[in-house]
Image (cartoon, helix red, strand yellow):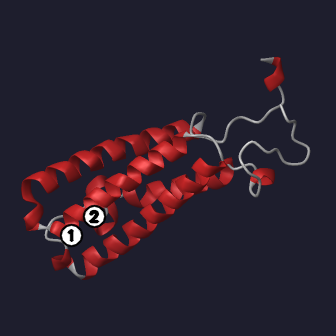
Amino acid sequence: MDDLKGSAPPASGAHGAGRVLVAVYAVFAVAAVARAAVQISSRFTEAPVAYALSAFAAAVYVVATVALARPGRGAHRLATAACSIELAGVLVVGTVSLVVPDAFPDATVWSVYGRGYLFIPLVLPVLGLLWLRRSAPADDHQLPDGVRGPGRPSG
C-alpha cells in the first residue's frame, strides 16, 4: 500500500458525494427500465413516442450510472455525455410536453421537466455535470488514461 501514498483518488463515483450521485442514478435507471418495459410490453400502440422516449431515458440512466461509477478519462467523458444528453432531453421533452401536450398522450420520465418524479430528472444531470467538473483533475484533462500530469507521482 505504500506505493499508493501521494497518488490521487480515482476519479469515479466510488467516493464521497459521488456515491450518492451514483446511487440516485442507479435508482432512476432501475425505475426507468421497469417503467419502459411495462409501457412497451403492455400498451406501446397507445403512445409509441412517449414510451420510446421512456426507453431512451432508461438507457441514458443506465449509461450514466455505469460511467459515473467507473474511474478513468473515458468513463468521465461518457458520463459527461450521458448527463448532457439527459439534460437536453429533459429540457426538450419538458418544453414540448408543456407547449404541445397532445404530443405525449402518456407521460415520460422527462415530461413536464420530470414533474412526476419531483423534478429530480431536471436537477440530477445538473448535479452530475457539476460533480464531474469538480472531480476531474485539472492537469489530467488532456492526458490519456494512466498518464500523469506534471508534478503528479507516477505511482
Residue at 87% over, 41% down:
152
Question: Compared with residue 31, is residue 142 higher up or lower down, i.e. above or below?
Answer: below
Q: Which mark is residue 53?
A: 2
The residue that label 1 is drawn on is 49
Judged left or right of residue 22, residue 97 is left
Judged left or right of residue 56, residue 44 is left
Residue at 26% over, 74% down:
97
Q: Which mark is residue 96?
A: none
Q: Dot 2: what SS?
A: helix
Residue 147 percent across, percent down from the top left:
79, 45
Quadrant that contains the C terminus: top right
Quadrant that contains the N terminus: top right
Visible in this render: residue 151?
Answer: yes
Q: Are marks 1 and 2 in contact (CB under 8 Å)?
A: yes
Residue 22 percent across, percent down from the top left:
48, 41
Mark 2 surroundings within 10 Å by alpha-carbon count, few (fewer than 14), some (14 through 19), many (20 or more)? many
Residue 95 percent across, percent down from the top left:
33, 76
